[in-house]
Amino acid sequence: MTLKLIWRNIQRSAGDYLLLVMTVTLLAAILCLANCIAVFGSIQAGFQTASLPVLIVLILIFLINTIHTFMLHQRAKALAVTLLLGMERGKLRRLYLGELSVIGIGCFLLGTLIGASLFSLFISPLLQIRTHVSWLLLMGKSILQTGAYFFLAELLSGVWIDHQLASLQISQLLVQKRRNHPIHRKNLRFWQRCFVSSFALFLIFLIGIAAAQGELLTLCIGWIALPMIVCIIAFYQSLYAYFSHLRSAGKLGQIQGNRLLWLAELTTGAKTSANLNALLCVCLVFAASAFGFGLLLLDSGANLFERSMQTYMGFMQISLCLIFLILYFSMLSLLQILDLKRQARTLRILHALGKDQASLNRLMCIQTLFHLGLPAGMGLALLTAAVPLINFRLNEEISVLRQNQVLRLFGGFGFCFCALYLVYFLAVTAISRRNLKSLTNS
Protein backbone atom coordinates (compact mmCIF):
# COMPACT_ATOMS: atom_id res chain seq x y z
CA MET A 1 0.00 0.00 0.00
CA THR A 2 2.80 2.40 0.93
CA LEU A 3 4.73 1.70 -2.28
CA LYS A 4 1.56 2.19 -4.31
CA LEU A 5 0.97 5.57 -2.68
CA ILE A 6 4.61 6.57 -3.26
CA TRP A 7 4.36 5.63 -6.94
CA ARG A 8 1.08 7.55 -7.31
CA ASN A 9 2.67 10.68 -5.80
CA ILE A 10 5.63 10.36 -8.18
CA GLN A 11 3.28 10.11 -11.16
CA ARG A 12 1.27 13.09 -9.96
CA SER A 13 4.42 15.26 -9.73
CA ALA A 14 6.07 13.81 -12.85
CA GLY A 15 6.87 17.25 -14.32
CA ASP A 16 8.92 18.35 -11.32
CA TYR A 17 10.47 14.91 -10.79
CA LEU A 18 11.57 14.69 -14.44
CA LEU A 19 14.05 17.49 -13.79
CA LEU A 20 15.23 15.74 -10.60
CA VAL A 21 15.73 12.49 -12.55
CA MET A 22 17.78 14.25 -15.25
CA THR A 23 20.01 15.97 -12.70
CA VAL A 24 20.67 13.01 -10.40
CA THR A 25 21.15 10.59 -13.33
CA LEU A 26 23.78 12.90 -14.81
CA LEU A 27 25.57 13.12 -11.46
CA ALA A 28 25.50 9.33 -11.04
CA ALA A 29 26.92 8.85 -14.56
CA ILE A 30 29.75 11.34 -13.92
CA LEU A 31 30.56 9.70 -10.57
CA CYS A 32 30.62 6.22 -12.15
CA LEU A 33 32.89 7.44 -14.94
CA ALA A 34 35.25 9.02 -12.39
CA ASN A 35 35.39 5.80 -10.35
CA CYS A 36 36.16 3.77 -13.47
CA ILE A 37 39.04 6.12 -14.32
CA ALA A 38 40.32 5.89 -10.72
CA VAL A 39 40.13 2.08 -10.45
CA PHE A 40 41.61 1.34 -13.88
CA GLY A 41 44.22 4.08 -13.42
CA SER A 42 45.55 2.42 -10.28
CA ILE A 43 45.93 -0.87 -12.22
CA GLN A 44 47.10 0.43 -15.58
CA ALA A 45 49.63 3.05 -14.51
CA GLY A 46 50.30 2.14 -10.91
CA PHE A 47 49.22 5.40 -9.27
CA GLN A 48 46.32 6.31 -7.02
CA THR A 49 43.57 8.61 -8.28
CA ALA A 50 41.12 8.36 -5.39
CA SER A 51 41.01 12.15 -5.06
CA LEU A 52 39.06 12.33 -8.35
CA PRO A 53 35.87 10.55 -7.17
CA VAL A 54 36.19 12.04 -3.67
CA LEU A 55 36.21 15.57 -5.11
CA ILE A 56 33.24 14.77 -7.33
CA VAL A 57 31.30 13.21 -4.44
CA LEU A 58 31.69 16.44 -2.43
CA ILE A 59 30.12 18.29 -5.36
CA LEU A 60 27.52 15.52 -5.62
CA ILE A 61 26.46 15.92 -1.98
CA PHE A 62 25.98 19.66 -2.37
CA LEU A 63 24.09 19.44 -5.68
CA ILE A 64 21.81 16.57 -4.61
CA ASN A 65 20.94 18.52 -1.47
CA THR A 66 20.25 21.60 -3.62
CA ILE A 67 17.90 19.75 -6.00
CA HIS A 68 16.14 17.96 -3.12
CA THR A 69 15.62 21.29 -1.35
CA PHE A 70 14.14 22.71 -4.56
CA MET A 71 11.76 19.76 -4.76
CA LEU A 72 10.71 20.37 -1.15
CA HIS A 73 9.92 23.97 -2.08
CA GLN A 74 7.91 22.78 -5.09
CA ARG A 75 5.93 20.24 -3.05
CA ALA A 76 5.66 22.26 0.19
CA LYS A 77 2.10 23.50 -0.36
CA ALA A 78 0.82 20.02 -1.27
CA LEU A 79 2.53 18.58 1.83
CA ALA A 80 0.91 21.24 4.01
CA VAL A 81 -2.54 20.41 2.59
CA THR A 82 -1.92 16.69 3.29
CA LEU A 83 -1.13 17.53 6.92
CA LEU A 84 -4.29 19.64 7.17
CA LEU A 85 -6.33 16.68 5.90
CA GLY A 86 -5.15 14.63 8.88
CA MET A 87 -2.08 12.63 7.86
CA GLU A 88 0.44 12.20 10.67
CA ARG A 89 3.67 14.13 10.19
CA GLY A 90 5.80 11.01 10.68
CA LYS A 91 3.94 9.10 7.96
CA LEU A 92 4.16 12.10 5.62
CA ARG A 93 7.92 12.29 6.13
CA ARG A 94 8.31 8.57 5.42
CA LEU A 95 6.22 8.86 2.25
CA TYR A 96 8.17 11.84 0.94
CA LEU A 97 11.55 10.29 1.73
CA GLY A 98 10.28 7.09 0.11
CA GLU A 99 9.58 9.03 -3.10
CA LEU A 100 13.11 10.43 -3.10
CA SER A 101 14.56 6.97 -2.37
CA VAL A 102 12.70 5.28 -5.25
CA ILE A 103 13.78 8.01 -7.65
CA GLY A 104 17.35 7.87 -6.32
CA ILE A 105 17.61 4.11 -6.90
CA GLY A 106 16.30 4.47 -10.45
CA CYS A 107 18.70 7.34 -11.19
CA PHE A 108 21.63 5.37 -9.76
CA LEU A 109 20.91 2.35 -11.97
CA LEU A 110 20.44 4.43 -15.11
CA GLY A 111 23.39 6.75 -14.39
CA THR A 112 25.72 3.83 -13.60
CA LEU A 113 24.74 2.13 -16.85
CA ILE A 114 25.48 5.33 -18.80
CA GLY A 115 28.80 6.00 -17.03
CA ALA A 116 30.08 2.42 -17.36
CA SER A 117 29.03 2.30 -21.02
CA LEU A 118 30.83 5.56 -21.81
CA PHE A 119 34.02 4.26 -20.18
CA SER A 120 33.86 0.88 -21.92
CA LEU A 121 32.98 2.20 -25.38
CA PHE A 122 35.08 5.36 -25.60
CA ILE A 123 37.69 5.92 -22.88
CA SER A 124 38.91 2.33 -22.56
CA PRO A 125 39.67 1.86 -26.32
CA LEU A 126 41.27 5.31 -26.42
CA LEU A 127 43.67 4.43 -23.60
CA GLN A 128 44.17 0.87 -24.87
CA ILE A 129 43.68 -0.56 -21.40
CA ARG A 130 45.16 -4.02 -20.86
CA THR A 131 45.07 -5.68 -17.46
CA HIS A 132 45.68 -9.17 -16.05
CA VAL A 133 42.86 -8.66 -13.54
CA SER A 134 39.33 -9.61 -14.61
CA TRP A 135 37.62 -6.72 -16.42
CA LEU A 136 34.27 -7.58 -14.84
CA LEU A 137 35.87 -7.59 -11.39
CA LEU A 138 37.33 -4.12 -11.86
CA MET A 139 34.09 -2.80 -13.34
CA GLY A 140 32.17 -4.30 -10.42
CA LYS A 141 34.54 -2.58 -7.99
CA SER A 142 33.97 0.74 -9.76
CA ILE A 143 30.19 0.33 -9.60
CA LEU A 144 30.28 -0.66 -5.92
CA GLN A 145 32.35 2.44 -5.09
CA THR A 146 29.91 4.55 -7.11
CA GLY A 147 27.01 3.06 -5.16
CA ALA A 148 28.69 3.73 -1.81
CA TYR A 149 29.44 7.37 -2.66
CA PHE A 150 26.04 7.96 -4.28
CA PHE A 151 23.98 6.55 -1.42
CA LEU A 152 26.13 8.43 1.10
CA ALA A 153 25.14 11.65 -0.68
CA GLU A 154 21.49 10.56 -0.81
CA LEU A 155 21.55 9.63 2.90
CA LEU A 156 23.02 12.96 4.01
CA SER A 157 20.52 14.85 1.85
CA GLY A 158 17.65 12.70 3.18
CA VAL A 159 18.62 13.45 6.78
CA TRP A 160 18.61 17.17 5.99
CA ILE A 161 15.22 17.03 4.23
CA ASP A 162 13.76 14.96 7.08
CA HIS A 163 14.98 17.58 9.54
CA GLN A 164 13.35 20.31 7.44
CA LEU A 165 10.02 18.47 7.32
CA ALA A 166 10.11 17.75 11.05
CA SER A 167 10.80 21.38 12.01
CA LEU A 168 8.61 23.33 9.56
CA GLN A 169 5.10 24.16 10.66
CA ILE A 170 2.11 24.03 8.31
CA SER A 171 2.08 27.81 7.96
CA GLN A 172 5.77 27.76 7.00
CA LEU A 173 5.21 25.00 4.44
CA LEU A 174 2.49 27.08 2.79
CA VAL A 175 5.00 29.88 2.05
CA GLN A 176 8.16 27.75 1.74
CA LYS A 177 8.24 28.08 -2.05
CA ARG A 178 8.56 31.86 -1.78
CA ARG A 179 11.14 32.08 1.03
CA ASN A 180 14.09 34.33 0.32
CA HIS A 181 17.09 33.22 2.49
CA PRO A 182 19.23 36.36 1.91
CA ILE A 183 22.78 36.89 3.13
CA HIS A 184 22.67 39.45 5.94
CA ARG A 185 24.13 42.85 5.17
CA LYS A 186 26.36 42.78 8.26
CA ASN A 187 28.34 39.90 6.70
CA LEU A 188 29.34 42.03 3.69
CA ARG A 189 32.35 43.68 5.35
CA PHE A 190 33.58 40.38 6.82
CA TRP A 191 33.53 38.60 3.44
CA GLN A 192 35.14 41.58 1.71
CA ARG A 193 38.05 41.45 4.15
CA CYS A 194 38.36 37.68 3.66
CA PHE A 195 38.44 38.18 -0.10
CA VAL A 196 41.13 40.87 -0.04
CA SER A 197 43.39 38.99 2.38
CA SER A 198 43.04 35.60 0.63
CA PHE A 199 43.59 37.13 -2.82
CA ALA A 200 46.73 38.88 -1.54
CA LEU A 201 47.99 35.59 -0.08
CA PHE A 202 47.22 33.85 -3.39
CA LEU A 203 49.35 36.41 -5.24
CA ILE A 204 52.20 35.93 -2.76
CA PHE A 205 52.18 32.17 -3.37
CA LEU A 206 52.10 32.81 -7.14
CA ILE A 207 55.15 35.05 -6.91
CA GLY A 208 56.83 32.33 -4.85
CA ILE A 209 56.11 29.77 -7.58
CA ALA A 210 57.56 32.14 -10.19
CA ALA A 211 60.73 33.06 -8.26
CA ALA A 212 61.38 30.65 -5.35
CA GLN A 213 63.63 27.60 -5.29
CA GLY A 214 63.87 24.37 -3.32
CA GLU A 215 61.65 23.86 -0.28
CA LEU A 216 60.07 27.31 -0.57
CA LEU A 217 58.89 26.45 -4.09
CA THR A 218 57.44 23.15 -2.85
CA LEU A 219 55.68 24.98 -0.03
CA CYS A 220 54.11 27.50 -2.41
CA ILE A 221 52.89 24.78 -4.81
CA GLY A 222 51.50 22.66 -1.97
CA TRP A 223 49.55 25.44 -0.23
CA ILE A 224 48.36 27.73 -3.01
CA ALA A 225 45.03 25.89 -3.37
CA LEU A 226 43.93 26.93 0.15
CA PRO A 227 43.91 30.74 -0.34
CA MET A 228 42.52 30.22 -3.84
CA ILE A 229 39.46 28.33 -2.55
CA VAL A 230 38.94 30.80 0.32
CA CYS A 231 39.20 33.66 -2.18
CA ILE A 232 36.52 32.12 -4.41
CA ILE A 233 34.14 31.48 -1.50
CA ALA A 234 34.65 34.96 -0.06
CA PHE A 235 34.12 36.62 -3.46
CA TYR A 236 30.72 35.04 -4.09
CA GLN A 237 29.59 35.48 -0.50
CA SER A 238 30.48 39.19 -0.60
CA LEU A 239 28.90 39.54 -4.08
CA TYR A 240 25.55 38.13 -2.96
CA ALA A 241 25.74 40.05 0.32
CA TYR A 242 26.14 43.20 -1.78
CA PHE A 243 23.12 42.22 -3.89
CA SER A 244 21.11 41.73 -0.70
CA HIS A 245 22.31 45.15 0.48
CA LEU A 246 21.06 46.74 -2.76
CA ARG A 247 17.68 45.11 -2.26
CA SER A 248 17.24 46.84 1.10
CA ALA A 249 14.47 49.44 1.41
CA GLY A 250 16.80 52.42 1.16
CA LYS A 251 18.28 51.32 -2.17
CA LEU A 252 15.29 50.09 -4.17
CA GLY A 253 14.34 53.56 -5.38
CA GLN A 254 17.63 53.75 -7.33
CA ILE A 255 16.85 50.59 -9.37
CA GLN A 256 14.35 50.62 -12.19
CA GLY A 257 12.82 48.29 -14.78
CA ASN A 258 14.33 44.92 -15.58
CA ARG A 259 17.27 45.50 -13.24
CA LEU A 260 14.88 45.42 -10.30
CA LEU A 261 13.53 42.05 -11.46
CA TRP A 262 17.05 40.66 -11.99
CA LEU A 263 18.06 41.81 -8.53
CA ALA A 264 15.02 40.15 -6.96
CA GLU A 265 15.79 36.87 -8.72
CA LEU A 266 19.48 37.01 -7.79
CA THR A 267 18.79 37.54 -4.10
CA THR A 268 16.14 34.81 -3.87
CA GLY A 269 18.02 31.98 -2.18
CA ALA A 270 21.22 34.05 -2.04
CA LYS A 271 22.99 31.72 0.40
CA THR A 272 22.48 28.67 -1.80
CA SER A 273 23.39 30.62 -4.95
CA ALA A 274 26.62 31.94 -3.43
CA ASN A 275 27.71 28.46 -2.33
CA LEU A 276 26.78 26.90 -5.67
CA ASN A 277 28.61 29.54 -7.71
CA ALA A 278 31.71 29.13 -5.54
CA LEU A 279 31.61 25.35 -5.96
CA LEU A 280 31.23 25.56 -9.75
CA CYS A 281 34.01 28.16 -9.92
CA VAL A 282 36.33 25.71 -8.14
CA CYS A 283 35.28 23.06 -10.72
CA LEU A 284 36.25 25.44 -13.52
CA VAL A 285 39.67 26.19 -12.02
CA PHE A 286 40.34 22.46 -11.56
CA ALA A 287 39.22 21.85 -15.16
CA ALA A 288 41.67 24.46 -16.47
CA SER A 289 44.50 23.03 -14.36
CA ALA A 290 43.74 19.48 -15.53
CA PHE A 291 43.57 20.62 -19.17
CA GLY A 292 46.96 22.32 -19.04
CA PHE A 293 48.70 19.58 -17.08
CA GLY A 294 47.18 16.86 -19.26
CA LEU A 295 48.40 18.40 -22.52
CA LEU A 296 51.84 18.96 -21.02
CA LEU A 297 52.00 15.25 -20.12
CA LEU A 298 50.93 14.26 -23.64
CA ASP A 299 53.68 16.40 -25.15
CA SER A 300 56.29 14.05 -26.60
CA GLY A 301 59.08 16.36 -25.49
CA ALA A 302 58.13 16.22 -21.79
CA ASN A 303 59.77 13.30 -19.99
CA LEU A 304 58.46 13.53 -16.44
CA PHE A 305 57.46 9.87 -15.88
CA GLU A 306 57.73 6.51 -17.59
CA ARG A 307 56.19 6.96 -21.06
CA SER A 308 53.12 4.69 -20.78
CA MET A 309 52.35 5.97 -17.30
CA GLN A 310 52.75 9.59 -18.46
CA THR A 311 50.42 9.02 -21.43
CA TYR A 312 47.77 7.49 -19.18
CA MET A 313 48.07 10.34 -16.69
CA GLY A 314 47.71 12.86 -19.52
CA PHE A 315 44.51 11.24 -20.83
CA MET A 316 43.19 10.99 -17.27
CA GLN A 317 43.75 14.72 -16.74
CA ILE A 318 41.97 15.55 -20.02
CA SER A 319 39.09 13.26 -18.97
CA LEU A 320 38.98 15.06 -15.63
CA CYS A 321 38.81 18.41 -17.43
CA LEU A 322 35.90 17.24 -19.59
CA ILE A 323 34.06 15.83 -16.56
CA PHE A 324 34.31 19.14 -14.70
CA LEU A 325 33.32 21.22 -17.74
CA ILE A 326 30.29 19.03 -18.45
CA LEU A 327 29.38 19.15 -14.75
CA TYR A 328 29.75 22.95 -14.76
CA PHE A 329 27.56 23.64 -17.79
CA SER A 330 25.03 20.86 -17.18
CA MET A 331 24.33 21.96 -13.62
CA LEU A 332 24.04 25.61 -14.60
CA SER A 333 21.73 24.74 -17.49
CA LEU A 334 19.49 22.61 -15.29
CA LEU A 335 19.39 25.30 -12.61
CA GLN A 336 18.45 27.88 -15.22
CA ILE A 337 15.52 25.68 -16.26
CA LEU A 338 14.59 25.37 -12.58
CA ASP A 339 14.64 29.16 -12.29
CA LEU A 340 12.28 29.46 -15.24
CA LYS A 341 9.84 27.09 -13.54
CA ARG A 342 10.14 29.05 -10.30
CA GLN A 343 9.53 32.35 -12.14
CA ALA A 344 6.45 31.05 -13.99
CA ARG A 345 4.01 33.17 -11.99
CA THR A 346 6.17 36.31 -12.33
CA LEU A 347 6.45 35.86 -16.10
CA ARG A 348 2.69 35.42 -16.46
CA ILE A 349 2.14 38.64 -14.51
CA LEU A 350 4.66 40.52 -16.68
CA HIS A 351 2.92 39.22 -19.80
CA ALA A 352 -0.46 40.31 -18.44
CA LEU A 353 0.96 43.78 -17.69
CA GLY A 354 2.00 44.27 -21.32
CA LYS A 355 5.37 42.54 -21.81
CA ASP A 356 5.27 40.88 -25.21
CA GLN A 357 6.85 37.54 -26.12
CA ALA A 358 9.94 39.16 -27.66
CA SER A 359 10.65 41.24 -24.52
CA LEU A 360 10.31 38.21 -22.26
CA ASN A 361 12.60 36.21 -24.55
CA ARG A 362 15.25 38.94 -24.36
CA LEU A 363 14.89 38.96 -20.59
CA MET A 364 15.44 35.21 -20.40
CA CYS A 365 18.41 35.34 -22.82
CA ILE A 366 20.17 37.97 -20.71
CA GLN A 367 19.46 35.99 -17.56
CA THR A 368 20.86 32.82 -19.16
CA LEU A 369 24.01 34.64 -20.32
CA PHE A 370 24.56 35.95 -16.81
CA HIS A 371 23.89 32.67 -14.99
CA LEU A 372 26.13 30.57 -17.25
CA GLY A 373 29.00 33.04 -16.90
CA LEU A 374 28.74 34.15 -13.28
CA PRO A 375 30.65 31.20 -11.71
CA ALA A 376 33.40 31.66 -14.32
CA GLY A 377 34.10 35.28 -13.36
CA MET A 378 36.34 34.77 -10.35
CA GLY A 379 37.87 31.60 -11.79
CA LEU A 380 38.99 33.35 -14.97
CA ALA A 381 40.35 36.26 -12.90
CA LEU A 382 42.48 33.87 -10.82
CA LEU A 383 43.67 32.01 -13.92
CA THR A 384 44.52 35.30 -15.66
CA ALA A 385 46.68 36.26 -12.67
CA ALA A 386 48.32 32.83 -12.43
CA VAL A 387 49.05 31.98 -16.06
CA PRO A 388 51.65 34.72 -16.85
CA LEU A 389 53.66 33.96 -13.70
CA ILE A 390 53.58 30.18 -14.24
CA ASN A 391 54.43 30.73 -17.91
CA PHE A 392 57.42 32.87 -16.86
CA ARG A 393 58.66 30.13 -14.54
CA LEU A 394 58.33 27.35 -17.14
CA ASN A 395 60.07 29.48 -19.79
CA GLU A 396 63.16 29.36 -17.59
CA GLU A 397 62.95 25.57 -17.26
CA ILE A 398 62.18 24.37 -20.80
CA SER A 399 63.76 24.71 -24.22
CA VAL A 400 63.37 27.72 -26.50
CA LEU A 401 61.17 25.72 -28.87
CA ARG A 402 58.51 25.38 -26.17
CA GLN A 403 58.46 28.94 -24.87
CA ASN A 404 55.08 30.39 -23.79
CA GLN A 405 53.51 26.95 -23.82
CA VAL A 406 51.31 27.74 -20.80
CA LEU A 407 49.86 30.77 -22.59
CA ARG A 408 48.95 28.60 -25.58
CA LEU A 409 47.38 25.96 -23.35
CA PHE A 410 45.33 28.59 -21.52
CA GLY A 411 44.21 29.96 -24.88
CA GLY A 412 43.14 26.45 -25.93
CA PHE A 413 41.16 26.00 -22.72
CA GLY A 414 39.52 29.39 -23.25
CA PHE A 415 38.46 28.32 -26.74
CA CYS A 416 36.96 25.05 -25.43
CA PHE A 417 35.14 26.93 -22.68
CA CYS A 418 33.67 29.46 -25.13
CA ALA A 419 32.58 26.67 -27.51
CA LEU A 420 30.79 24.76 -24.73
CA TYR A 421 29.32 28.02 -23.42
CA LEU A 422 27.81 28.73 -26.84
CA VAL A 423 26.41 25.19 -27.21
CA TYR A 424 24.78 25.17 -23.78
CA PHE A 425 23.53 28.74 -24.15
CA LEU A 426 21.76 27.88 -27.40
CA ALA A 427 20.30 24.71 -25.89
CA VAL A 428 19.02 26.43 -22.74
CA THR A 429 17.69 29.37 -24.75
CA ALA A 430 15.74 27.02 -27.04
CA ILE A 431 14.23 25.18 -24.05
CA SER A 432 13.44 28.47 -22.29
CA ARG A 433 11.74 29.90 -25.37
CA ARG A 434 9.54 26.83 -25.73
CA ASN A 435 8.63 26.81 -22.02
CA LEU A 436 8.02 30.57 -22.05
CA LYS A 437 5.70 30.24 -25.03
CA SER A 438 3.65 27.58 -23.24
CA LEU A 439 3.52 29.78 -20.10
CA THR A 440 2.27 32.89 -21.89
CA ASN A 441 -0.26 30.93 -23.97
CA SER A 442 -1.74 29.09 -20.98
Image: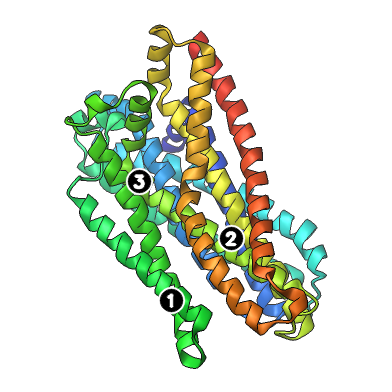
Q: What element carries label 3?
A: helix
In the image, residue 127 sits, relative to residue 28, either above or below, namely: below
Q: How far apart are marks 2 and 3 (CA)?
A: 22 Å
Which circle, 2 or 3, is nearer the viewer? 2
Tell me which label, 1 or 3, sits earlier in the chain.
Answer: 1
- Evaluate whether residue 23 shows in this view: yes
Amino acid under disc 3:
Thr
Which circle, 1 or 3, is nearer the viewer? 1
Percent position of residue 249, x then y:
17, 30
From this viewpoint, which residue is outermost toward the bottom? 214
Which circle, 2 or 1, is nearer the viewer? 1
Residue 123 disc label: none
Which residue is disc 1 drawn over? 205
The residue under the point 41% across, 54% down is 278
Which residue is disc 2 drawn over? 287
Q: Distance between the residues labelled 2 and 1?
A: 20 Å
Amino acid under disc 1:
Phe
Tell me which label, 2 or 3, sits earlier in the chain.
Answer: 3
In the image, residue 69 sits, relative to residue 362, either above or below, namely: below
Left or right of 340? Residue 79 is left
Quadrant where the N terminus sits is top left
Percent position of residue 351, x then y:
43, 11
Q: How far apart are marks 1 and 3 (CA)?
A: 30 Å
Percent position of residue 426, x then y:
64, 32
Closest to the observer, 189 or 169: 189
Which residue is disc 3 drawn over? 272
Left or right of 35? Residue 302 is right
Q: Is mark 1 on a helix, strand or loop?
A: helix
Closest to the observer, 304 or 127: 304
Percent position of residue 21, x then y:
54, 40
Q: Please name the colour scheme applied to the rendered image.
A: rainbow
Label 2: how many Cα within 10 Å (few below 14, some 14–19, many 20+):
many
